């Protein structure tokens, strides 16, 4: 279980770093993601999915909302 928690914290740390580098607001962050997808669609192409409540809550926390 500890390894699983460490992995979750590592993912959160990466998300925070990317947000700091490519934020500071949701629109700029998502523009960066869309630009990456346009340059490398083969790497990021995944079927669309809905965000979970937890993911939405984390985005809200990251944006200070």
Image (tube, rainbow, N blue to C red):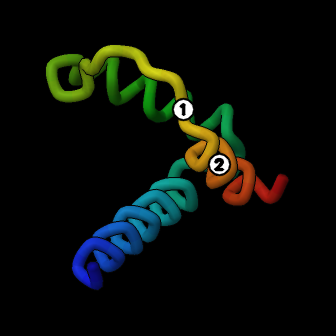
**Picture residue at 67% right of the left edge, 58% below the top:** 62
Q: Foreground residue, 57 or 16?
A: 57
Task: Note whether 21 is above or below 56 in the view shown.
Answer: below
* Percent position of residue 12, x then y: 45, 65
Q: Which residue is mark 1?
A: 51
Q: Quadrant of residue 34?
A: top left
* Percent position of residue 15, x then y: 46, 58
Task: Note whether 28 is above or below 13 in the view shown.
Answer: above
Q: Secondary structure at mark 2?
A: helix
Task: Note whether 53 is above or below 7 in the view shown.
Answer: above
* Percent position of residue 63, x then y: 74, 53
Dots 1, 2 in contact, CB < 8 A: yes
Farthest right residue? Answer: 65
**Picture residue at 31% right of the left edge, 79% below the top:** 6
Left or right: residue 5 versus residue 12 is left
Is the N terminus in the top left, top right, bottom left or bottom right quadrant? bottom left
Task: Note whether 14 is above or below 37 in the view shown.
Answer: below
Within 10 Å of disc 1 (Cα), the crowding (few <14, some 14-19, many 20+) is few
Within 10 Å of disc 2 (Cα), the crowding (few <14, some 14-19, many 20+) is some
Mark positioned earlier in the residue sequence (1 or 2): 1
Q: Foreground residue, 5 or 15?
A: 5
Number of the label disc, if any, that sits on residue 59: 2
Farthest bottom residue? Answer: 2
**Picture residue at 84% right of the left edge, 52% below the top:** 65
């Amino acid at each position: 279980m500890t390894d699983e928690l460490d992995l979750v914290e590592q993912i959160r740390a990466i998300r925070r770093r990317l947000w700091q580098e490519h934020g500071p607001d949701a629109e700029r962050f998502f523009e960066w993601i869309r630009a990456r997808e346009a340059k490398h669609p083969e790497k990021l192409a995944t079927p669309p999915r809905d965000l979970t409540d937890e993911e939405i809550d984390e985005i809200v926390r990251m944006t200070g909302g």
